[in-house]
Image (tube, rainbow, N blue to C red):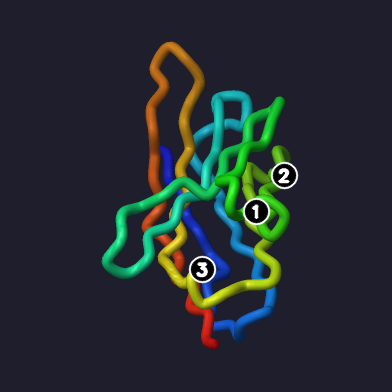
Amino acid sequence: QVQVVESGGALVQSGGSLQLSCTATGIGSDGIGSMGWFRQAPGKQRELVGTITLYSTNYLDSLRGRFTISRDIAKNTMYLQMNDLKPEDTAVYYCNVVTLPPLRMTYWGRGTRVTVSS
């Protein structure tokens, strides 16, 4: 059974940095098509932060330059490095894993909370 677990959420001051991790188990790295970070702020819809595949990394335009997504294939783990954090980055951050075609199954983690104080 595929499981996705996020970690690293914390309370941090504005201007600080934080690194989140997302580890997938129950699936080999060669079965993963993409991994992605999403976030949901209080009272708002979940939004895409960015995705990573073997070939490319994409970001929400407004986060480009402050947030960096990377992946350790050997550990089946994806990271989100967040710098110069702002109060508006406060959200629950979720990770998802999408398997390769033809099934293209999507698995979600339960999220990790990031709170940025002003």
Check if mark 1's residue and mark 2's residue have beta carbons within 8 Å: yes
Q: Residue at x 31, y 54 (%)?
A: 45
Q: Residue at x 51, y 68 (%)?
A: 89
Q: Give the structural element (helix, strand or loop) at label 1.
A: strand
* Occupied quadrant, residue 57: top right
**Quadrant including the C terminus:** bottom right
Q: Which residue is mark 3?
A: 89
Towards the viewer: 115 or 66: 66
Mark 2 vs 3, N-terminal side: 2
- The label on residue 72 is 2
Mark 1 vs 2, N-terminal side: 2
Q: Answer left or right for 17 relative to 113.
A: right
Q: Which residue is mark 1?
A: 79
Q: Give the structural element (helix, strand or loop) at label 3.
A: helix
Mark 3 vs 1, N-terminal side: 1
**Quadrant including the N terminus:** top left
- The number of discs equals 3
Q: Amino acid at mark 2?
A: Asp
Q: In the image, residue 78 lies at what x, y percent?
A: 63, 48
Q: Give the structural element (helix, strand or loop) at label 2.
A: strand
